[in-house]
Amino acid sequence: MWLDPGEFEVLGYVVHVLFDDFCDADDPSFWLGKSLESPGWPVVLAVAARLAQVLVKNDLAALSGLHEAGHRRPALLPTADA
């Protein structure tokens, strides 16, 4: 909660405030990378990077499990050129 941690905020309202009130919705390129800058932004980036690693690791483990269980990718369908 960015205004009052003890109060519940509606996500739609927060998005509205961030992007409609603080950005030019018709030309947002100026605001890319700026509208969410804060002292905590490096931590947000680090957590997002770690999450991406976990997601990829989980996907690879799931694919490996399917492969070991005998599931194979289906053969490619013939094209009109074949």
Image: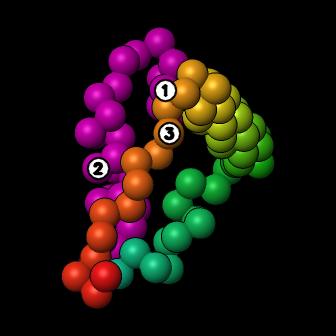
Residue 15 locus on image (x, y percent): 34, 46
Q: Tell me, yes or no, whether the highlighted magenta stretch contains residue 71.
A: no
Query: Which residue is drawn at the image coordinates 50% and 39% (left, top)?
Result: 72
| Numbered range of the magenta stretch | 1-26
Give the residue type that dot 3 points to: Arg
**Of marks 1 and 2, which one's residue comes earlier in the chain?**
1
Residue at the extreme bottom of the image, as rendered: 81
Q: Tell me, yes or no, whether the highlighted magenta stretch contains residue 12.
A: yes
Q: Mark 3 Cα within 10 Å, few/some/many (few <14, many 20+)?
A: few
Numbered label attached to residue 16: 2
Q: How many marks?
A: 3
Q: Nearer the viewer, residue 10 or 67?
A: 67
Gap between marks 3 and 2, in whole Å?
46 Å
What residue is shown with label 3?
Answer: 72
* SS at mark 3 in the image: loop
Determine whether label 1 and label 3 are within 8 Å by CB: no
* SS at mark 2 in the image: helix
